[in-house]
Image: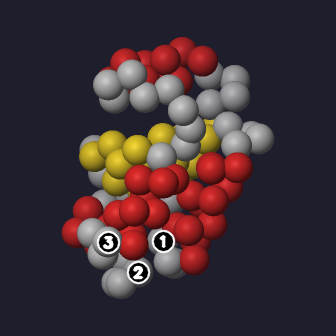
Amino acid sequence: MDKKATKPIHVYTTTYCPYCVSAKKLLESLGLTYAETNLDNDPELRARLSRENNGWRTVPMIFIGDHFVGGFTDLKSLHDAGKLNELL
């Protein structure tokens, strides 16, 4: 996989979320950089993100560019299927 993403990756997390940790480790293992926003102290942003993404409430919330990927399992599935590079 080409390690240079042409679209920015943004991961919305909370402090004690094991799936958030796994998502960040996967991205780092692929050599991909990402921006992270912790939602612990911003329930308004979390609620807005949920409304904008068909009611998705859990974290991580992963975006590649403007595309909402989903959570860790979705990110891993895209990677395992060889489709992550297409989004980048």
Q: Amino acid at mark 3?
A: Ala
Q: Residues within 10 Å of mark 3 (few under 14, many from 20)?
A: few
At 70% from the left edge and 49% from the top edge, which residue is drawn?
18
| Residue that mark 3 sits on | 81
Query: Disc 1 vs disc 2: Cβ atoms closer than 8 Å?
Result: yes
Place of residue 80 in the rendered image (x, y in percent of width and height, measured from the top left): 39, 72
CA gap, disc 3 to disc 1?
17 Å
> Can residue 5 be seen from the camera position used here?
no
| Residue that mark 2 sits on | 3
Q: Earlier in the sequence, mark 3 or mark 1?
A: 1
Q: Quadrant of the N terminus?
A: bottom left
Q: Amino acid at mark 1?
A: Leu
Query: Disc 3 vs disc 1: Cβ atoms closer than 8 Å?
Result: no
Residue 50 figure quarter? top left
Q: Earlier in the sequence, mark 1 or mark 2?
A: 2
Q: What number of labels is visible?
A: 3
At 34% from the left edge and 84% from the top edge, which residue is drawn?
2
| Residue that mark 1 sits on | 32
* Relative to 27, 56 lies left or right: left
Place of residue 46 in the rendered image (x, y in percent of width and height, measured from the top left): 52, 24
Q: Residues within 10 Å of mark 1 (few under 14, many from 20)?
A: some
Above or below — where is 48 with respect to 24? above
